[in-house]
């Protein structure tokens, strides 16, 4: 008998039983006949006809100020420097950054709003390019979460739990649906540069990590300088033929280990080495935008040819999408405006406004928006009351999880839609609340997945992206 440790036994059998359980669970639901050709993924997926083949998630890390961008409250002009009423706050939790303030003075937005599109969606003057695309957007103004600080909040929305260790949205999609291009990962991540407040919250790789899923499903981070992917280039003196021989030898050794231990991580390591070898050709081709015509570059704005900018990342996301990458996530930091919001927020908006609109236009012109889902938003919103000193032209805002705004566009989304309402202080939701679980359930649904049936057995629980509490589709925004 081959030597088999207790650890390897349970690792191997849990993986095998997990896959068997998933297959048995959905055996009666055959995949949609028109599902695209793919590499990897579960044979039982999709659960239903997907409307989106792929998704691009534009993540504004730090908490964009909803009342300065999407949720106008013009009546707050009369409340300048008056205290937030206790009847509005209702004893809700505060961060330690403002809990010690003697008062909570109202800071009206200094930015003008105007109606746009067929349904008169109100958009701030900070977003002139995105405003022109509102007929393609479903703006959700009633998002909410329980997390009030950055790290647990961003971990929560990206992985379904405030505590580290869970699989990210992109990893779930990679695991369940595979990829349409075996030469590129199913899940790619970019962290864009930003021009607003430079003291930004750190981003940890657990936000695109695979958690309890096999490690091959974690997101692959692309860099703006040096190798697009760490260690992608061959070391000096090593040509592709030598690299191929080295990988063949290493693969044989890893295969011997796998045959002996049946450790799924060893199988993942073999596959990842082969993927890395193929990526030595596919990634440089992907990141070389020299073949893009000028009229396409112009869509994304003047920063598009500067590596690492949000504009450049958006163009890269479109290139990934047309090459079959299942899920692309762009993190844009710097949205944490506790002070000097009038100085920093316009810079952040300039970073993302034209590129976001350009991405939608580019996808539409290529006939890809009908099967590509685009999501824009952050981990929470901002308070109507000021943090620190307040004047007519200078204010800051603290974290606010009880209501914030996101938008979705593309595959399966009903454009020219505004969903949800907040009170006159943009502090509490008054109509159609949408929890972040609902958002993730809706994304999975558009990708052809029933979130309640998409599980992975781990630590005695059928793990789900949406967790154990109820999650509901945002049906009014679905086409």
Image (tube, grey):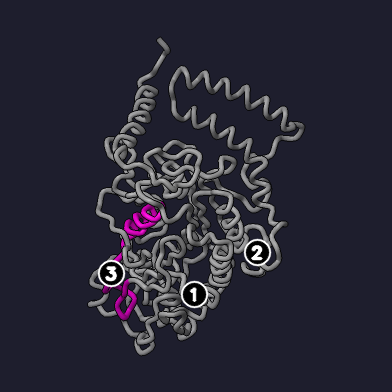
Can residue 129 be seen here? The reply is yes
All told, the count of numbered labels is: 3
Whether label 3 touches label 2, CB < 8 Å: no
Q: Residue furthest front?
A: 33
- 237 or 134, nearer to the observer: 134
Residue where numbered disc 2 is placed: 304
User: Dot 3: what SS?
Assistant: loop
Residue where numbered disc 1 is placed: 341
Residue where numbered disc 3 is placed: 432
Residue 305, numbered circle: none
Pick the quarter of the image with the N terminus: top left
Whichever of callouts 3 and 2 sits on the residue coming sooner in the sequence is 2
The residue shown at (51%, 47%) is 187
Whichever of callouts 2 and 1 sits on the residue coming sooner in the sequence is 2
Residue 29 in picture, x, y percent from top left:
32, 42
Q: CA distance from mark 2 to mark 1?
A: 25 Å
The magenta span reads 420-447
Q: CA distance from mark 3 to mark 2?
A: 37 Å
């Amino acid at each position: 008998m081959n030597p088999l440790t207790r650890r390897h036994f349970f690792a191997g059998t849990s993986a095998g039983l997990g896959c068997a359980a998933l297959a048995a669970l959905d055996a009666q639901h055959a995949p949609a006949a028109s599902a695209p050709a793919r590499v990897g993924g579960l044979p039982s997926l999709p659960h239903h006809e997907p409307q989106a083949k792929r998704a691009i998630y534009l993540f504004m890390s730090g908490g964009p100020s909803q009342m300065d961008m999407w949720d106008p409250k013009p009546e707050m002009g009369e409340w300048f420097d008056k205290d937030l009423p206790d009847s509005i706050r209702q004893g809700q939790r505060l961060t330690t950054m403002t809990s010690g303030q003697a008062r909570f003075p109202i800071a009206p937005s200094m930015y003008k709003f105007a109606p746009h599109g067929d349904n008169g969606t109100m958009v701030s003057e900070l977003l002139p390019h995105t405003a022109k695309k509102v007929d393609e957007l479903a703006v959700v103004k009633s998002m909410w979460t329980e997390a009030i600080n950055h790290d647990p909040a961003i971990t929560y929305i990206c992985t379904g739990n405030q505590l580290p260790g869970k699989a990210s949205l992109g990893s779930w999609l990679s695991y369940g649906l595979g990829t349409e291009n075996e030469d590129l990962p199913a899940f790619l991540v970019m962290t864009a540069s930003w021009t607003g407040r430079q003291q930004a919250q750190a981003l940890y790789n657990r936000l695109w990590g695979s958690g309890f899923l096999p490690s091959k499903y974690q997101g692959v981070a692309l860099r703006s300088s040096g190798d697009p992917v760490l260690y992608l280039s061959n070391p000096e003196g090593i040509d592709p033929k030598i690299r191929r021989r080295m990988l063949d030898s290493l693969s044989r050794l890893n295969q011997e280990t796998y045959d002996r231990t049946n450790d799924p991580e060893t199988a993942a390591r073999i596959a990842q080495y082969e993927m890395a070898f193929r990526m030595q050709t596919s990634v440089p081709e992907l990141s070389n935008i020299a073949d893009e015509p000028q009229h396409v570059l112009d869509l994304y704005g003047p920063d598009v040819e500067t590596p690492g900018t949000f504009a450049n990342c958006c163009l890269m996301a479109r290139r990934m999408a047309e090459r079959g990458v299942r899920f692309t996530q762009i993190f844009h930091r710097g949205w944490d405006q506790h002070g000097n919001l009038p100085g920093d927020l316009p810079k952040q908006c300039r970073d993302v406004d034209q590129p976001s609109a350009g991405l939608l236009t580019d996808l539409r012109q290529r006939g890809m928006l009908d099967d590509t889902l685009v999501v824009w938003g952050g981990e929470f919103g901002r308070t109507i009351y000021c943090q620190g000193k307040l004047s007519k032209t200078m204010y800051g805002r603290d974290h606010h999880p009880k209501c914030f705004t996101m938008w979705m566009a593309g595959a399966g989304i009903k454009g020219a839609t505004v969903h949800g309402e907040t009170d006159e202080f943009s502090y509490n939701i008054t109509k159609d609340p949408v929890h972040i679980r609902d958002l993730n359930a809706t994304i999975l649904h558009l990708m052809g997945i029933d979130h309640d049936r998409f599980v992975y057995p781990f630590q005695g629980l059928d793990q789900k992206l949406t967790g154990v509490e109820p999650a509901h589709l945002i049906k009014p925004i679905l086409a």
